[in-house]
Each structure stands twice: as structure tokens, then as C-alpha cells.
Amino acid sequence: MLNQKKFIVSHAPFWHDGGTVTARSYNMIAAVLPAMLFGFISYGMPAVGVVSLSTSSAIVWELLFNKISKRTVSIGDGNAAVIGILFGMLLPATSPWWLVITGTFVSVVIGKQIFGGIGGNPFNPVLIGLAILMVSWKDFFDFNEALVNYDLGFAMAYPLASLKHFGVSAISDFSAADLLMGQQSGGIGATFGLGLIIGGIYLIIRGFIRWEISVSFLAGIVVTALFFNISDPARYAGPVFHLLTGYTLIGAFFLATEDSSSPVNFIPMLIYGAGAGIMTVLIRNIGAYFDGVVFAILLMNIANPLLDKIRPKALGKVV
Amino acid sequence: MIKRPFISLAKPRIEYEALDVTLPEPKMIQTPKKVTLLLNEPFEPFGKKNAVVLKKDDSVKTGQKLSLYDGSDAYVISSVTGTISSISSFLGEFGRSYTAIDIDVAEDEEMDEAFKALSVEPTMDIAKAYLSEIPGNPPISLFSNGSASPSIDSIVICGVDSDLLITANQHTLVSDEKALQKGVSILKQLTGIENIIMAAPEHLMQNAGLSGAQVAVVDAGYPATLPRIMMQNVLGKIVPAGKSCEDMGVCFVSAEAVASLGMAFDQGQIPFSKKFNLIKKDGTSVMISARVGTPIHEIFSACDVTVNEKDRIILGGPMTGSSIYSENHPIQPDTHAVMIQDGKTLPLVSDYPCINCGECVRICPAKIAVNMLVRFLEAGQYEQAAEEYDLYSCVECGLCSFVCVSRMPILHYIKLAKYELGRIITAEATNA
């Protein structure tokens, strides 16, 4: 009995489908590559600098906080890298270095780690970082001002700002095809609609994001924008314009679908997505900000725990 | 192992193994030198129990009924002829205590005749006294009161297997037609229950029809063969959370158990050969027939399976089985499969938190909000988990752990919670 072989004993099930958090993160990064590379080509080295700094600082913040809080180092799961990359992609290419580092600090440490790390954050960490920066240093997020020295061969006015200031007549220059192909100013990785859609569809097909959220988010935007447009076509832009400008597409596929802060049941996902879409257009059309995606998703994040209480009756549940 | 498909828009469908069309002949394992029988009763030789009637060096015959204590109801049927070499305590899963009886096998086999004389006229008492430990483990005690008992009114015979990769019950359905037929009629006669339903996969409908029971088709996608799911899909009854299928008057018996029952009364001899699948490291499966009590290492060596340190040996299938710590563990009457996994490629669980990806919620056949449930279970708040997040609706299929991106041992948490709550309830009942 003494020289018996020792076996690994564990509880059922003994199979696993092989999915890992790391694989999810890496696929997410792969999916944002088209839009990110397009941003690099458009805005050149400053954009590369911003995204690189954002990614690396997010990882460093996570590592530091892991050490300070004496927990296992979790940078290997790639979640911090995803936060960093997405955060960088939302910024204008001319963002100063301290803005990027402060932003990733807020995202990773305040947005995620103090809630217990991955899976514990009630808000999308990227959006928390961005929202706090947008409120604190408003001027750096004025894309017209930030990108004033760029001339990329198309109208460099930030479409949503033009819409806000001058109404629909000011945006007649933007054709849907141009917007889709990234012929607009904006965040580094947020302008290339086609790339974002390709990345989003890739993630949906692979099952890494929940299609219900993306689809209902876009549907919410289309329907609300359509209503506004019908009511006063001179003041409010059509749904296609709202779909292809600002953070709409990156929000639909990469921000609203963040795991921890979004619901998982079917009906709540639809409400969550649609709610965020409606809020986005409301903020854009009658709110103070040019773009409503950031605050719309954050608002729906708050509603998430409540929404997720709407769930199917479990098998054999009495009452 | 089934991997996550590249395209996973919908939830994956995992199918049960269908029995090969050319009926595989079970590989017979020779009677080993030593067998171990597990008696479902704690071994307390100096306790308050009645006098111990089994001793070391007692000789036993094949088919002899062995009881540890005088007047005790628990027994095992010796599957070999030989002498008892040791009696010891054995600790199973979740703190269950057994008594392990080791028997050194003699060269000449002698049959015990006690059952033969009784088997001419089948009664429930005989079945209860001799046949509850036959291969397949029929739950005879459940309907031992016969027609007088109002609790059970339908019996479902599982011609399907409870887990992936296993084909033992399907094999019985095809190969033991006569015994099964006999078993069904005996079961009707003994219990007085007319509503006997044979649940079988679609491709074995014909064989199931021959058994004389009503026939019902069971879907080939996991977890269609788990009792609670079968209750829903086959019988159209939904088991309320916290109740068992037996509470609803339905009892599940494996096809193998029914065949063993038929065989016992047909031949006047208690069957002792257990049919099961050996699932090798490469995932291939072999049908094996071995005596109950055969140590597992005998089966590995007979089938040329090399067993290394840090491998994982599992009794039962990949989703619901239980892993064991010793190669000397015996084949039991309810062992439907023996599985071995290579230690180098084991998918291990982690202590990573839930990231709320929702895979488990989508795949759960009981529609439990697993993402919330597991948070309560991790924090040890079992009562709240049961009240608010449907702990007792769980059918224990293991799919949540199977798909968990964070590799949390979700099913383990659920089982632990049920066990702990069970303990609290028992303690409250005794202290009340």
C-alpha cells in the first residue's frame, strides 16, 4: 500500500471545452486590430504612441495593484491589455502622455481592481476611465481642437460636433460610404466603421461577445434616431449618420459587451442594449455632449444587476 | 475531449455515444486473485451494533450473501469463491462509509445454492433479500412494499446511458433481449406496477419494443438522459426543486439491472458479471465484462493501459463520474464506466473568479442563473443560494463547469452546497 501510485482526484466534470479567459482577451485584441491599424495609418506615429502607452501602462497599473494588494498576478489573462488597447483607441491621436497614463490608472485601478479585479467591476473599466477624463479635461476630447494639425484629405470636422453646432445641413458632406470607410475624424480606433464591424462579427461568430447586446444597441440607435429624424429632419440627423459616427460601432461591439458589466439573460440583454442605444441618441440630440455612447453605456451598467433579475424560471421552480 | 467549436454562435450540442452497429463483444476479464466488495454500511466492530458475523478467514462461495452484522439488512453478494482476507473501513465520497471486504479467490469455484431454491417463485422479499446488489444496482428497496406502497407508480427503464462515451445500457438492450424481457415481466409481477416505460435512443427503438414495456425515445444530446430531464421530456412531469423523482412516483432503473433481475430468476443464480465501458486515455472505449469486486488495476493490465502517477481515474463518465485515488478500487454494481485520463493533458480547475461571460447560463438545461448562483456559493451563502438562485433546480449535468471560461469547479460548489445544506437540515431535525 505504501508505494501506491498517486492519482489526481477532482470533482466531475472531467472534461472542459478548452475555453480560457486569455483566449477571450486575445481574440478581442485580434478583433480590434483592423480598426486600430487603420487608425495608425491615418494618424501616424502619435497614434501608435498613444495606443502603445495606453496598453503598456494599463498592464503596469494592473501589475502594480496586484503587488500592492498582495494578490496573484493577473496580467497574464490579457484583460488589462484589452482595457489599455480599447482605451487608447478611444482617445484622439494627440493626447498627451499624462492623460493616457491617468486614464489607464482610472480604468484599471478604479474601474476594475478595487472592485476585486476581473468579473467584479460594475462598470466598463474603459468607459469609467474615459468618462472621468472627459469630465476633468474636456478640451482634450474636443476632436476638432485635438486634431487641428491633421489634414488627411477629407473634412476634418468632428461629425458629431458639426451636427450639434450647425444642424443637419453641416453634415451633408459626410456620405455613409465615407464614414464607413473611416473618412472622418475621431478617436484613433473608432473611426473605421467597416473594420469595427468585421471585428465585431468575428467576435459574435466565435461566441466571445453576446450578439444580443450589439444588435439591440444598434437597433436602439437606429429606431430612436429615426424618430428624431422624422420629427424634425432639419435638426436631427438620420439613423445611418448616428450609426457610423462617434463611438457607436466600437461601443456596440467592444464596450457595451464587456462581460462583467452587462447582463447575460436574453431579455435583459435586449433591454440593456436597446436602453444604451436610446440613451446614446438622446444625449447626442438633446443632451450637452457631442457623443452619448460613453455615458449611455455607463448608465445602463448601473441598471445591469437589476435587469439581470429578469430571468427564465428555473426547472421545477415552485412559485 | 470535446473542444469549443471555432464557430460558437449557438450553444454546443454534445451527443451521447451511440452503440456500434456491429455489436461489440465484451472483453471478458479473468477472475482476479483477489476481489474487494464494498458493503454499504460503516465498519464499527466495537460499536453499539450487533455482533459481527463476518470474520477474517471465513470461506465464502460464489453467490453467497454476506452480511456484516447479525440481523443487518445491508449485504453484498460474493462474486467469487474464496476466503476473506480482511475486513476494513472504507471512506467514499462526501463522507460515506463503507466496509471493504477483501476476498482471496480460491481455484475451484463453488456456487451458493441458497437463492436457487427460492428463485422458483419470485417474490419481492426474495428480490429484496438477494438482488439489490446485482449488476446495475436496481433500487429494489424503493418498491419493496410492492403494490401496497403508493409512492412509486411508474418505472422508467433506462436503455440509455447516463453519461457521454458509455454504451453499457445500450449494449444490454441489444444483447440481452431475453433477460430483459424476463426482467420486465418479473418487475411487473413483483411490484404490481403496470406503467413501465423503456427509454431508449432512437436507433434502438426496435430492441426496446421487444422488451414488453412501453417505449419512449430519448434525445441523443447531453443531458437528455439525466433523470430530471427525462421526467420532463419523456414523462411530461416537472420535478419541483427540492423534490426527487421518487417523490413524484417515478423510479429509474437501468436496463442492465432489469436484465440482471431477469437473469437471476431465469437461471436461479445471482449474476455477478458487470458490463461497463473502459474509456482509455485516447478517448476510445472498450466494452468490458468483469466480476463485481475486480480491482481496477486488473482491468487496466488486461487492456494494456499504462497507468502513471498523476493520471486521473474516474468511475463513471466524463461529466458526472467520480475520480478515485487508488488503483485497487473495485468494480461496483453501479460502475457503468472506468475512465482514465492522461495526467499531462488534464484540464484542471482554477481559483479564478467568475467573469460573467454567460456561457453557463446559456448552456444550463435547468435555466439556472449560474453566474449569480456561483457567487453565492463561493461566499458560502448556501441558504441564500437555495432560496434565491435555484440551487435545488440543478440537475447536476456538469455542463456549467464544462464550458466555464474561468474553469471554476461550479458543479463541485453546487454539490458541496447541497451536501452542507443537507447536513444543516439533519442537524436541525435532530436538535429540534
Image (cartoon, coloured by chain):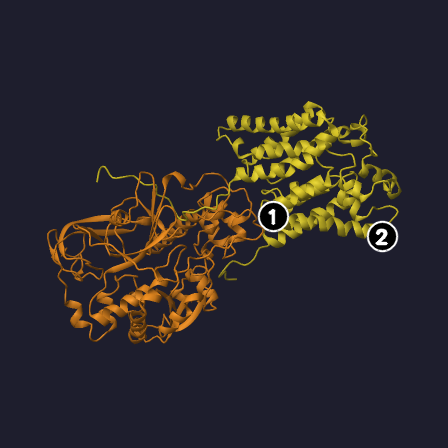
Chain colours: A yellow, B orange
**Left or right, B262 with reference to A189:** left
Secondary structure state at the residue bearing disc 1: helix
The amino acid type found where label 1 is placed reads Ile
Toward the viewer: B191 or B198? B198
Where is residue B315 shown, x and y percent of the image?
Answer: 33, 51
Q: Residues within 10 Å of mark 2 (few under 14, many from 20)?
A: few
Residue A107, image x and y in percent? Answer: 63, 32
Q: How far apart, in angstroms, are the residues tagged by discs 1 and 2?
A: 37 Å
Task: Please determine whether, in this image, residue B23 is positioned above or below residue A297.
Answer: below
**Of pointers 1 and 2, the one earlier in the residue sequence:** 1
Q: In the image, residue B33 lies at what x, y percent?
A: 17, 50
Q: Are marks 1 and 2 on the same chain?
A: yes
Q: Give residue B210's quadrant in the image.
A: bottom left
Report if residue B125 is visible in the image: no
> Which labelled disc corresponds to residue B427?
none
Residue at numbered disc 2: A231
- Residue designated by label 1: A205
- Amino acid type of disc 2? Ser
Quarter occupied by residue A84: top right
Identity of the residue drawn at 49% across and 57% down = B366
| Tag in front: 1 or 2 | 1
Q: Given the current orientation, which residue lies at the most extreme front position?
A: B22
Q: Is residue A270 above or below residue A189?
A: below
Q: Is residue B404 left or right of residue B148?
A: right
